[in-house]
Image (cartoon, coloured by chain):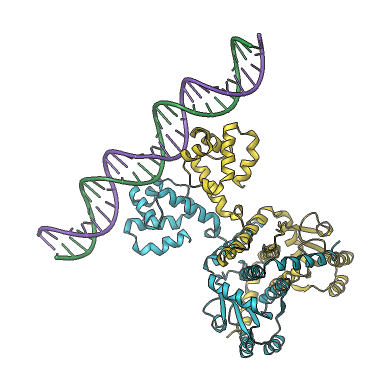
Chain colours: A yellow, B cyan, C green, D purple
Amino acid sequence: MQLTQSIVRNLATLRKSERKVADYVLENLSDVIRLRITDLAAQAEVSEPTVIRFCRAIGCRGFQDFKMTLAQDLAASPGFGQITVNETDSTEDYCHKVFDSTADTLRKVRDQLEIGVITQAVNALSIANRVEFFGFGASGAVAADAQHKFFRLQLATAAHSDHHIQNMSATSMSEGDVVVAISQSGRTSALLQSLSLVKEAGGTVISIGPSNSPLAEMADIAIEVNVEENTEIYTPLSSRIVHLVVIDVLAIGLAQRRGPSLKEHLLKLKKGLKTLRV
Amino acid sequence: MQLTQSIVRNLATLRKSERKVADYVLENLSDVIRLRITDLAAQAEVSEPTVIRFCRAIGCRGFQDFKMTLAQDLAASPGFGQITVNETDSTEDYCHKVFDSTADTLRKVRDQLEIGVITQAVNALSIANRVEFFGFGASGAVAADAQHKFFRLQLATAAHSDHHIQNMSATSMSEGDVVVAISQSGRTSALLQSLSLVKEAGGTVISIGPSNSPLAEMADIAIEVNVEENTEIYTPLSSRIVHLVVIDVLAIGLAQRRGPSLKEHLLKLKKGLKTLRV
DNA sequence: TTATTTTTTGTAGTTTTACTACATAAAAAT
DNA sequence: ATTTTTATGTAGTAAAACTACAAAAAATAA
């Protein structure tokens, strides 16, 4: 768990002078890791033992442990700094920011993912005769990628980002078949309509999208992915990438179920691809 | 820069006993951050001053600094542990591994990216009348995503993953137009063939793929992305994701060039999309 | 309010830890 | 073989982190 969260949570139980420390720490996160206990005590205008008591209060073993934990937390999610790109950023700046913010988003989603739901989804996929991926816009590209990935796992699979084709395909679904519906908003009406047909036909719907959305409610198995999409223009929309990683997780899960028989198949595929290269 | 890299790089210049420390550290990365100087000295079978000398030799100010830096590095890229999924992994295990390894890959590529090349690419894109994305297989999906993303930036853009269409489009290119070629291997012959037509027609080729590949050599602007694709079956192929993030970087760079006029355009787009939702 | 208890906070001292100076041992060069 | 250089450890120092305890503040009861 994040140390900063632990500080905020225990804020109420802290004594007055410990709180001074907490306030200073939260205000100067990145500086604190370079301070000695003497310095931090001086900055927060308390005594050294108070600093130690603060560290213990938020669940650390001592000051050293506190600093170490904080340093690791900060390194793991650089999101505390500004990750939104602004007009004056140099190429290097925005380059790093885009990579960092994406990595940070992945980290956040990872900790928030419901493991049980993933297991359910892998179960459903492993018994499916047919797996199709539905998505519009940016999610259409994600669906295409997923199709490509699952195809390699010896699965009868397709991706559709055309509403009419989705509908036609939906009506031909049968018991046990799976449609993975991908959406950033979770409220695309055309997608929801296609999915209702899938369910009517007896197919299973796995959704990848935000929670509390019509999509999540309608799905049999809802993989809830909440990415705070910064509305700033210069911020990249990273939900697509998170969706791709979720697809990766499903593919890995499925591959694991299949076991070694798959290995041989993948080798054959690789050989086939080689002939297309110079 | 990664501390472990710094250790490996300086391995040759280290004295015999310092090397013992280096060996122990590299073997027990995650444990070291919890050791005191006394313990590390004991484990590596050297004296304490030797440990300090080792820390200085690899560019740290002292033992504390060394431990802190290492802790941060480890937190930022958990890739030192095993990130390859194995047969006995639980759902939670492989879930985390997939997310972590992807985040780790992003970090590595970030540090390796040539900033100058990105600037060149953004320059080329900003003066292009037409921008097209070429890619096959998994890179086809990346191209589709890129097309979608750049379309929002008021750019005449298309994505082709069909060789014939690529060829037709290539011949109609004119001076200043740009083709962004995406490939995981950098040696897909069909792609290379299409690109030669693009260059003949006077178009600029930006490549996203591994260095030292025919693709990188042929491109006018080669964005070199080297992802050590683990050949283990259970490992996800994350180069697609890195390519997407590179696309994000280019898009952000382009958006920054455009400035505030783009803001208005994006707001209009958003409004239009709203009507498609429930 | 005043006295008593409890809690909070800091002072002063202890222990631990990192680091330095120097001496010895090993290796290299003469 | 002897001197010079380099490498490594011993012993000691400075410092930082932590503890025990006492003073101060706050809360409670008379």
Camera-nearest residue between B195 and A147: B195
Camera-nearest residue between B95 and B49: B49
Residue B85 seen: no
Quadrant holding the C terminus of chain A: bottom right
Q: Residue shown at 37%/51% (left/top)?
A: B51
Residue A88 seen: yes
Q: Position of residue A71 (x, y in %)?
A: 53, 49
Choose top left, top right, bottom left or bottom right for residue B242. bottom right
Q: Residue shown at 77%/55% (left/top)?
A: A211
Counting every numbered tag in the picture gives: 0
Choose top left, top right, bottom left or bottom right for residue B110. bottom right
Q: Position of residue A188 (x, y in %)?
A: 83, 64
- Residue B48 lies left or right of residue A187; in this view the side is left
Choose top left, top right, bottom left or bottom right for residue A104. bottom right
Q: Position of residue B149 (x, y in %)?
A: 71, 71
Q: Is residue C30 above or below residue D29?
A: below
- Residue B225 lies left or right of residue A184; in this view the side is left
Q: Position of residue B106 (x, y in %)?
A: 58, 64
Q: Is residue B124 above or below residue C18?
A: below
- Residue A121 lies left or right of residue A19; in this view the side is right
